């Protein structure tokens, strides 16, 4: 089993300024390359969140992104969020790049369009959920922010044997004075629950800064199915962006499996039958 | 290779259709709130003349109150042209010289900067118009066109302030066509556009861009969603300089704050303008 050193940055992007954000991504990658193998940025880190029509100005093709990431240090794999332009569609996407090549691309499936959110107005819905090989043998998947609030998606990653789920996010702070404040504690509760139920690691990467008066908490954390929240190995700041370094030990998943848990008894055919039955009951 | 005018056409306007839509729309927006009167600041320029003509068609000449608000440095032609347009459309007008409001402030604060003075004058005119609207139970009719609004060539909380703006979706070139169609006197239609914020001021000289060029570029950029890259590449192919187009893009970006309400720092779960979204014409 392998141990992996990774870094996650609670990055604060310039709204709609792809070039400037790319430069900051590159500087951070150069700064952290001697320390870690993987570097994770938040949702839409290369362009900012409240883009509105800027989304279309920020859209890049995968080919263009390959060229941009070709100048990054080769020894580190960098995961970043961006607007992907592909076949006449704009997607809220997230990808990992190694030596300029994309390892994997996830297109956000659930685009929140309620409350303060308006994503489906500017983006098309992602249509697939895949995994990629992380550190050559472990399976990893991505759920971009709202994706993680839709229960079938963590479950689908579980069925695919994914051991690490990365959750890049641009979830804003809201309801600071309310009892049910939507904040990092709620994210921690959600991902701890998934981790415990599905025997998976969850890496949460939220952004910092403010877009048009909307504040972002700037928090990252890693959840282990064995230990819950994992303390950071190191915390730091580079060019005003804070980051945390974590040691991800996949052996913890094996230990968790040895201890046993509800995932062992998961029965997909029974779940499917029950879902279909309740679906008929409802409609 | 097509010529510049063909690749970058001016936005078209169906004079009869658009003017009747604007008149109908204006009437509807007033009456839905039970407001029968309009207040308009008439500068002597083509934009306020067109707004006045539309308001007169929508509400009737006796329901429109025009205000001519000169400052001591204003061009005498502005006042003359303002009177001309009011008389042409039989709209009653009043002249309120704002020198006595502005000058003591300029002197007390030693303001000699023309831009600061111009903005203060625009905001003082807004104060007068809103007070007159309260006096008459009227709405203030806006006079800023789409080109000005996009380039940010207007004063926030000054001449941008209004209850309803019939010109806000018309480029300057479209304003000219409609003004001509509705019979705005030629001396007003033909004179160089000026905000008259200081003697000899000319919009195009100050912006360093002609309205004709701005409208052609803005129409592609805003209405047709052409990318800045496409516009610049096409201009390059035509062997035309790119500075003016780039300046237009920069002005649009820099003035975005003027076209939106002020930033509210979000704390609650229902922030005004974010989650709390109701139409302006709520229940009317």
Image (spheres, coloured by chain):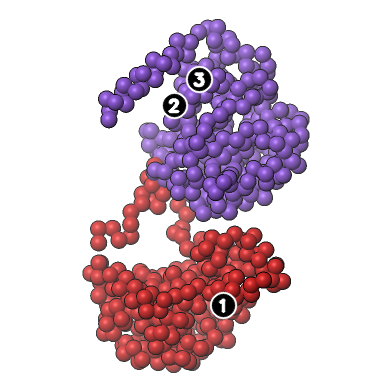
Chain B colour in the picture: red
Residue topped by disc 1: B212
Residue topped by disc 3: A159
Subunit ID for the residue under disc 2: A
Relative to B148, say whether B268 is above or below. above
Q: Is residue B227 left or right of residue B277?
A: right
Tell me, yes or no, whether the two marked residues, 2 and 3, touch with CB atoms within 8 Å. Answer: no
Q: Quadrant of residue A139?
A: top right
SS category of the residue bearing label 1: helix
**Residue depicted at x 64% and y 17%:** A249
Residue topped by disc 2: A152
Residue A32 rendering spot, x and y as whole percentages: 72, 33
**Residue depicted at x 58% and y 66%:** B251
Quadrant location of the N terminus of chain B?
bottom right
Residue A157 rendering spot, x and y as whole percentages: 52, 24
Q: Is residue B4 left or right of residue B135?
A: right
Question: Of callouts 2 and 3, which one flags the residue occurring earlier in the amino acid sequence?
Answer: 2
Residue A153 rendering spot, x and y as whole percentages: 47, 28
Q: Which of A154/A222 is in front?
A: A154
Tell me, yes or no, whether the two marked residues, 3 and 1, touch with CB atoms within 8 Å. Answer: no
Whether residue A134 is visible here, answered yes or no, is yes
| Marks 3 and 1 belong to one chain | no
**C-alpha distance separating marks 2 and 1:** 55 Å
Chain painted purple: A
**Residue depicted at x 25% and y 75%:** B36
Q: Which of B155/A24 is in front?
A: A24
Decide: few, some or many residues near mark 3? Use Cα within 10 Å; few <14, some 14-19, many ≥20.
Answer: few
SS category of the residue bearing label 2: helix
**C-alpha distance separating marks 2 and 3:** 10 Å
């Amino acid at each position: 089993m392998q141990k992996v050193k990774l870094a996650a940055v609670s990055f604060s992007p310039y709204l709609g300024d792809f070039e400037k954000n790319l430069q900051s991504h590159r500087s951070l990658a150069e700064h952290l390359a001697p320390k870690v193998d993987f570097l994770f940025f938040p949702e839409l880190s290369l362009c900012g969140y409240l883009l509105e029509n800027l989304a279309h100005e920020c859209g890049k093709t995968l080919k263009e992104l390959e060229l941009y990431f070709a100048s990054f240090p080769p020894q580190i794999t960098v995961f970043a969020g961006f607007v992907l332009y592909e076949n006449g569609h704009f997607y809220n996407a997230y990808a990992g790049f190694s030596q300029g090549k994309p390892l994997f691309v996830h297109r956000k499936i659930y685009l929140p369009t309620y409350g303060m959110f308006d994503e489906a107005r500017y983006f098309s819905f992602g249509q697939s959920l895949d995994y990629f090989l992380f550190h050559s043998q472990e399976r990893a998947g991505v759920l971009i922010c709202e994706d993680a609030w839709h229960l079938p998606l963590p479950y689908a990653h579980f069925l695919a044997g994914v051991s690490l789920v990365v959750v890049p996010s641009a979830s804003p702070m809201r309801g600071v004075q309310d009892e049910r404040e939507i904040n990092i504690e709620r994210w921690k509760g959600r991902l701890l629950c998934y981790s415990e139920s599905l025997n998976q690691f969850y890496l949460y990467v939220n952004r910092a800064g403010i877009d048009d008066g909307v504040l972002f908490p700037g928090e990252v954390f890693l959840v282990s199915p064995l230990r819950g929240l994992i303390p950071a190995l190191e915390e730091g700041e580079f060019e005003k962006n804070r980051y945390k370094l974590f040691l991800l030990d996949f052996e913890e998943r094996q230990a968790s499996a040895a201890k046993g848990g509800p995932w062992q008894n998961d029965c997909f055919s029974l779940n499917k039958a029950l879902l279909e039955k309740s679906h008929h009951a409802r409609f | 290779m097509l010529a510049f005018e063909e690749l970058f056409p001016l936005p078209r306007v169906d004079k009869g259709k658009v003017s009747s839509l604007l008149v109908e729309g204006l009437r509807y927006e007033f009456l839905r709130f039970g407001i029968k009167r309009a207040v308009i600041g008439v500068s002597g320029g083509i934009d306020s003349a067109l707004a006045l003509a539309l308001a007169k068609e929508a509400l009737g000449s006796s329901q429109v109150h025009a205000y001519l608000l000169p400052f001591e440095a204003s061009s005498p032609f502005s006042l003359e042209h303002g009177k001309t347009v009011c008389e042409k459309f039989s709209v009653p007008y009043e002249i309120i010289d704002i020198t006595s409001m502005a000058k003591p402030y300029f002197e007390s604060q030693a303001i000699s900067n023309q831009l600061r003075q111009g903005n203060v004058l625009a905001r003082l005119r807004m104060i007068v118009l809103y007070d007159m609207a309260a006096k008459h139970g009227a709405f203030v009719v806006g006079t800023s066109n789409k080109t000005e609004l996009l380039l940010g060539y207007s004063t926030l909380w000054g001449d941008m302030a209004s209850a309803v703006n019939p010109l806000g979706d018309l480029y300057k070139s479209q304003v000219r066509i409609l003004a001509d169609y509705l019979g705005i006197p030629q001396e007003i239609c033909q004179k160089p556009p000026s905000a008259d914020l200081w003697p000899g001021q000319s919009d195009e000289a100050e912006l360093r861009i002609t309205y004709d060029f701005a409208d052609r570029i803005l129409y592609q950029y805003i209405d047709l969603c052409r990318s800045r890259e496409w516009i610049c590449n096409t201009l390059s192919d035509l062997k035309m300089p790119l500075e003016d187009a780039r300046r237009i893009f920069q002005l649009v970006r820099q003035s975005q704050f003027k076209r939106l309400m002020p930033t509210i720092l979000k704390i609650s779960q229902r922030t005004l303008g974010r989650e709390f979204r109701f139409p302006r014409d709520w229940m009317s």
